[in-house]
Image: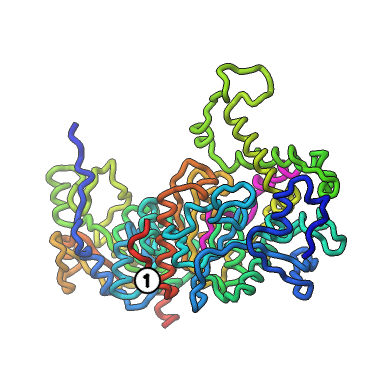
Amino acid sequence: MNAPDVGKIVGTTKAPRVDHVLIAEMVEAGSRVLDVGCGDGELLQLLTERKGVDGRGVELQRDKVNACVARGLSVIQGDADRDLDNYPDQAFDYAVLSLTIQATRQPKTVLENLLRIGRRAIVSFPNFGHWQVRTKLLLTGRMPINDNLPDQWYLTPNAHLCTIRDFADLCELVHADVEQAVAFNAYGARLPIKWSLSMQNLFGEKAVFLLHGAARSSGST
Amino acid sequence: MTAAPPNFVASVPRRHSEVHTPTSPVARFDAGAPLRLACQQDLAPFSIAYETYGALNSEKSNAVLICHALTADQYVASPHPITGKPGWWDNMVGSGKPIDTDRFYVICSNVLGGCMGSTGPASIDPKTNAPYGLNFPLITLGDMVEAQARLIDYLGIDQLFAVIGGSMGGMQVLEWASRFKDRVFAAVPIATAAWHSSQNIAFHEVGRQAVMADPEWKGGNYYAAGTVPKNGLAVARMAAHITYLSEEALHRKFGRNLQDRSEKTFSFSADFQVESYLRHQGSTFVDRFDANSYLYITRALDYFDLRENAGGVLANAFRGTKTRFCVVSFTSDWLYPTRESRTIVQALNAVAANVSFVEIESDKGHDAFLLDEPTFSATIRGFLNAAAVKRGLGAAKEAGR
């Protein structure tokens, strides 16, 4: 049997992920951060060490939650789709959703919740508009598989893949102001900010958006 | 206090001596400082029997209070004076263990209403100089916690580093965190719920009725009669014990295996191993526990609903909390299932509390919290270590187990 290469581990070196490093730059020191889909707590650990944040996490997989709590992080076993409703408005300075939104059942509701819970939201996601994805689909007629999208379509947790353009549209739809949008190419280098959205969408393999709810920005500080 | 009149001591001497003169230290609160109970009665004098392990640091910032479950007691990490068995959480509390007595000053007290030295229905009523029996006022988990708080005052401790407990102990943890927000730095409610469900109450009622149906119970005044409602209490324990296990655990342990025989006997003797096991659980229990204490404590559990003093909204019970919480549940616990813990977590999230929540995979049922579950131990150890650093108690020594 030709087993799909689903177990491929990406980036096992100690160096932090490029999108995590960017998020650590975006976040103000000493702020309160909620990391939704925090995995093994890598980002929370980085933010705690580099920025002294008061960090909390939500993670679906039980073993990852156990590992986080055992290493002293405040993490709950929960689900971005189900467990964000309970948090009060503006409970955190930042609500982070790192490479997770594409795996949620209701991305729009999740994004609205992030914008409500955090004074700012930071969302990163794999860009389905990347040129390699487009050419793979165009030339082979099959769902693309790469380091960023490692699973076969029937095994992937991703339910709602989108492009950078799609995500920008969603931000507009939920009245979120984009403070900063950064795309990374396949080598982990940041694309020039000056590039147009179309160019970012073509050459960005993943993107990080820093947002705030437009409705609130005028009223509060 | 004078010794109990001899006729009360005659039938089960060891158990009775632990009621009146426990092996552990006792804090006595005299008539001048009554405890106002939820039922609006004043209880005075009263005693709280307790054990401590480790040493209190000079800042008095390393105290950990462990709250025990329904039928446990203060002997959390030392041999039980009646059964001689190791402490009920010996695997969790001790030198180098997750609740490390080399670092923490661990306190565990027998609950109000108990029968191991804290004032309860088997204690002497100073008005009559005979055991209270059913004259003992109905108590609540809140009352138990208020009594514990008196003990913590008595020990000269302002803020507890952590309050930890499973099952009914977890409910006391929640009461502590709700009533004394500034006195609890970290809270670990395990395998518990914020109120008793209808099913929980139903099981307890079966147990109570079994005790009361025993003619030896004598309307609760069996002390004077020199009898013990052994059969009723044993049945209550047998029924309750089933709720502490899971179907898988029972099946794995016993299946349909026969006890010391190769054929069914076509009688009502304990043919099956599971019957023999439950009968053993029942008969050993009556040797160490007072039947009226069982009635009073199960009643206190049934009355427990943290929403009641919070305007019906659980989150209000925690509003303004700065405590760090670690809520733990077990997958196969059907007595206080994970969804009950999730309800607590949601309420804590609603007030933006600092909360961790871990569901531990185990097929051992509710009792899993008492057993050696490595993931559970690692969770408690990790959470306490991180909290200790935040509290300025320093990081744990590397070695450990």
Image check: A112 left or right of B149? left
Q: Is residue B41 above or below residue A148?
A: below
Q: Where does the C terminus of chain B fall, quadrant-wise?
A: bottom left
Can residue B197 be seen here?
A: yes
Q: Which residue is mark 1?
A: A94
Q: Is residue B396 above or below residue B158?
A: above
| Residue type pointed to by label 1 | Tyr
Is residue B128 one of those drawn in magenta? no
Q: Is residue A71 above or below residue A153?
A: below
Coloration mode:
rainbow
Image check: B390 left or right of B2? left
**What is the x, y in percent for residue B233?**
72, 42
**What is the x, y in percent for residue A60?**
39, 53
Towards the viewer: B48 or B389: B48
Chain under disc 1 = A
At 24% across and 46% down in the image, what residue appears? A151
Is residue B202 one of those drawn in magenta? yes
Can residue A175 be seen here?
A: no
Image check: A26 left or right of B234? left
At 23% across and 69% down in the image, what residue appears? A21
Towards the viewer: A220 or B233: B233
The span shown in magenta is B187-208
At 40% across and 78% down in the image, what residue appears? A217
Towards the viewer: B42 or B99: B99
For numbered disc 1, what is the local secondary structure? strand
At 66% across and 59% down in the image, what residue appears? B111
**What is the x, y in percent for residue A61?**
37, 51
